[in-house]
Amino acid sequence: MAYDAAGVERAVRDLLVAIGEDPSREGLVDTPARMSRAWAEIVGGLEEDPSVHLQTHFRVEHEEMVLVRDIDFYSVCEHHLLPFYGKAHVAYIPANSTVTGLSKLARLVEGYARRPQVQERLTSQIADALVTKLKPQGACVIIEAEHMCMTMRGVRKPGSWTVTSALRGVMNSPATRQEIMTLVMEGRK
């Protein structure tokens, strides 16, 4: 299904009326169009298969862990349509000397984050794409995020962070799991 900018504008106008606002008020006149443009960007990952970024790979004589740490991401909770954001840490151990560009890992995170999501699924989708496309010895994704649905409403606990992980292949071994956690946590307070 393609993004319907006019439909989003109508929905935002209806939402403003439903919450008791006047969409013709000076400060709100352009809000439906602005929100439509913003949402097109926020859910832009729905228009792509993020795993295509991993089609670019090459051979390098390296079969040790590759980690891109602290990849900033922003997503939107599919339950409340409120933002959640944080850091993704993506690692894999190449097999057959097959590696991908480091920026491709960030693009993978971005593609899956830019859609209505839950953090658990986001974590698994990134790990599964690595396994499917690169066929590594192992893959690990750790995501740390703050959810606005927990901080600005409901339980109202700002500063609460949710951490999820997905480990595949050799990343499940205790020694490798410890190595990845040490590398991710290194330099933090």
Image (cartoon, rainbow, N blue to C red):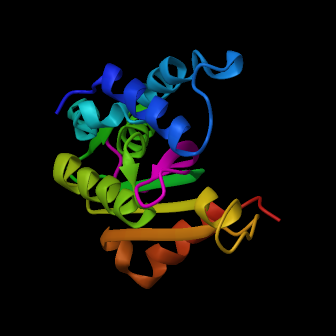
Residue that lies at the very extreme toward the bottom in this rendered image: 174
Q: Position of residue 138 (x, y in %)?
A: 31, 64
In the rendered structure, does residue 74 fall within the stretch colored magenta?
A: yes
Give the farthest residue toward the right: 189
Q: Residue at x 36, y 70 (%)?
A: 167
Viewer-proximal residue among 122 and 17: 17
- Residue at 59% of width from left, 61% of height from top? 149
Q: Is residue 93 left or right of residue 157?
A: left
Image location of residue 118, percent across then percent down: 41, 61
Q: Which of 121 and 130 lies nearest the eye of the viewer?
A: 121
* Above/below status of 93 relative to 22: below
Q: Can you give x and y, in whole percent of width and height, for residue 54 in the image?
A: 26, 37
Say whether residue 101 is visible. no
Relative placement, left or right, of 113 versus 55 is right
**Image location (x, y in percent) of residue 62:** 36, 47
Which image quadrant for residue 174?
bottom left
Q: Is residue 189 left or right of residue 61?
A: right
What range is drawn magenta here? 61-82
> Do we see residue 140 in this rendering?
yes
* Quarter in which the N terminus is drawn: top left
Q: Residue at x 54, y 43 (%)?
A: 74
Q: Nearer the viewer, residue 153 or 21?
A: 21
Question: How many numbered discs?
Answer: 0
- Tell me what residue is drawn at x 49 percent, y 40 percent: 15
Q: Quadrant of the C terminus?
A: bottom right
The magenta stretch spans residue 140: no
- Give above or below for 116 relative to 52: below
Image: 185 above or below 49: below
